[in-house]
Image: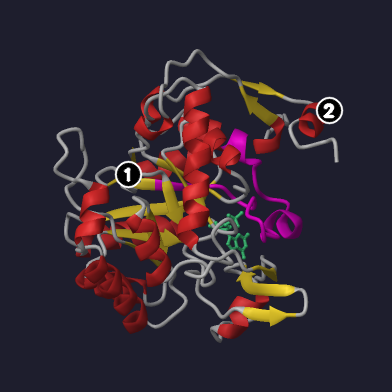
Amino acid sequence: MSKLALTYDDIQLVPAYSNISSRKNIDLTTQVTKNYGLRVPLVASCMDTVCESEMAITIAELGGVGCIHRFMTIEQEANEIATVVAAIQQQNIEDVWNLNDTNWKFKKAIPVMAATGANGDFKERAVALVNAGANIILIDVAHGHHENVKQAIATLKNILPSHVDIIAGNIASAQAAKDLEAWQADGLRVGVGGGSLCTTRLKTGFGVPNVSCLQEIIAVTNLPVMADGGIRTSGDIAKALALGSSCVMLGSLIAGTKEAPGKIIEKATGLFKRYRGAASLETKMTHNQEQKNVEGESTVIPFKGGAKFVIEGLLDGVRSAFSYGGANNINEFKPEYVQVTNAGQTEAKPHLL
Ligand code: XMP
């Protein structure tokens, strides 16, 4: 029988009693895998127009993590990781992370994350990335509930040192979450077909709207859940966290910034940068991949300036959300929510103009 499935616009969080006196004191510390923590619940997506070393360093400076994409040679990706590792030993980053804080419950290491696939050169790639200093490997597969992912996790668990955690995905069902947990994943990347440039749902009919997808999975797993795809505002981040996600993965929100890979494009109408789906024709052509299984679009988006300003704006919104929810930290952020009608969605946006 069919079930109704909701996404971010279908719900609103209900304000709760709050005694938060200053948003500055709100602690956004969270988990990204079984063993690794974050100071803020943000992960830069492993897309070739979102995250290489420059973005990863900038987001680490603010307490989040960037996942270096895999659409380059093993040597290039390992070099990107080496660049990130060199930068995160700087005092300003150590200060933000404050790993000697007695409340820090995770490994005393700043997470360094990079993507591999689940076949081809993934073993050699993962080994090179870990040798360069990565401590989290993300198996970047569109359909993560797959035998290839089971085998890839088993292989990597066997060959990589025990301090390395593995994030697997993407998934969109409770059974997938149970299976990935049984296959020894240390974190889940959740969301199928909801990304801003995804055509998976149109092309295949598969995918589950994000709110219901997260609810189904969070109800059955003990692993940290990273909500991925379709996050357009800090309000969406707050909704994902309210549902019990540990963190969110961002694509479009931080694409188009100075630190996102790619040149600034000058047009008569202003400055732009490219943003493209990992499975778009443009990405496949750029990286000499076979031009099949296209499931993404590509576009130009307005240049946004520095990523730090953009990310700080998002964090500002998330801290405000915690204040409305009466929460000092992520564990306390469990507001109720209501389902809204079309009229409620209209009311939720500026509607005078
Ligand atoms: P946002 O909405 O943040 O989404 O821009 C980023 C996420 O979208 C996914 N992604 C894709 N999904 N085809 C897809 O179906 C693609 O070509 C594609 N590229 C990225 C991915 O999960 C990313 O983090």
Which residue sits furthest top? 17
Q: Earlier in the sequence, mark 1 or mark 2?
A: 1
User: Between residues 117 and 312, which one lies in front from this camera angle?
Assistant: 312
Which quarter of the image is occupied by the N terminus?
A: top right
Q: Is residue 11 left or right of residue 88?
A: right
Q: CA distance from mark 1 to mark 2?
A: 37 Å
| Rendering quarter of residue 286 | bottom right
User: Between residues 301 and 218, which one lies in front from this camera angle?
Assistant: 301
Q: Is mark 2 within 8 Å of ligand 1?
A: no
For the residue marked with disc 2, what is the amino acid? Ala
The stretch in magenta equals 188-213
Residue 127 lies, in percent from the top left, at 25, 71
Above or below, comparing residue 44 to residue 126 in the picture: above
Q: How many marks can you see?
A: 2
- The answer to whether residue 343 of the structure is visible from this angle is yes
Question: Residue at 61% across / 45% down in the picture?
Answer: 233
Specify the quarter for ligand 1: bottom right
Above or below, comparing residue 120 to residue 336 in the picture: below
> Magenta includes 191?
yes
User: What SS does tag 1 mark?
Assistant: loop
Mark 1 Cα within 10 Å, few/some/many (few <14, many 20+)?
many
CB contact under 8 Å: marks 1 and 2: no
Q: Is residue 113 left or right of residue 267?
A: left
Residue 327 lies, in percent from the top left, at 42, 23
Question: Residue at 53% across / 35% down in the picture?
Answer: 238
For the residue marked with disc 1, what is the amino acid? Arg
Q: Which residue is mark 1?
A: 39
Mark 2 Cα within 10 Å, few/some/many (few <14, many 20+)?
few
Q: Is residue 100 left or right of residue 340?
A: left
Question: Residue at 78% across / 27% down in the picture?
Answer: 344
